[in-house]
Amino acid sequence: MSHGTTTAYSLGCRCDECRTAYSDYYRRYRETGPRYWRGPALIAEVTTLLERGRSIEDIAAGLEMQPKSIARAFRRHGVAVPFTQRKSVHSKATGAA
Ligand SMILES: [Zn+2]
């Protein structure tokens, strides 16, 4: 695995290069602001990151969103949710299943 990448970081590496890559990445999202990360842009970004092997929890943390909010955005746009949410948290089962 190559260091200085968010992928390496998400795989558990905490060397300086990987931590810097991750903090840069995280800052980019913070600066862009959550407003941008909605709808098609959010879906495209999340899909890309998932394809790169990142976990939904990791992606959600970077976006400062809950995985369930991301799942909701996918559904709202008629896109199949491409990840499995952890089932440990059963907050509300209000969905029209
Ligand atoms: Zn590393």
Image (spheres, helix red, strand yellow):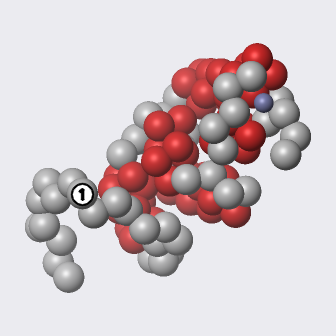
Q: Position of residue 83 (x, y in %)?
A: 49, 67
State the quadrant of the C terminus. bottom left
Query: Considering the numbered disc 1 on the image, is that residue within a helix, a strand or a loop?
Result: loop
Residue depicted at 82% across the width and 30% down the height: 4
User: Which residue is rendered at x = 52% and y = 43% of the image?
Assistant: 58
Is 83 in front, or is 27?
A: 83
Can residue 56 be seen here? The reply is yes
- In the displayed orientation, state which residue is furthest to the right: 2
Residue 77, can we see it? no
Q: Which amino acid is tagged 1?
A: Ser
Q: Quick check: 3 above or below 43?
A: above
In the rendered image, residue 43, in percent from the top left (x then y), is placed at 56, 59
Q: How far across and down, in percent of the image, does residue 68 sit?
A: 33, 56
Mark 1 Cα shell of 10 Å, populated few (<14), some (14-19), many (≥20)? few
Q: Residue at x 47, y 37 (%)?
A: 61
Question: Residue at point 74% right, 22% down?
Answer: 15
Q: Is residue 21 left or right of 34 when viewed as pictured? A: right
Residue under label 1: 88
Quarter of image, ligand 1: top right
Q: Is residue 8 left or right of residue 31?
A: right
Vertical arrangement, residue 43 with respect to residue 18, above or below: below
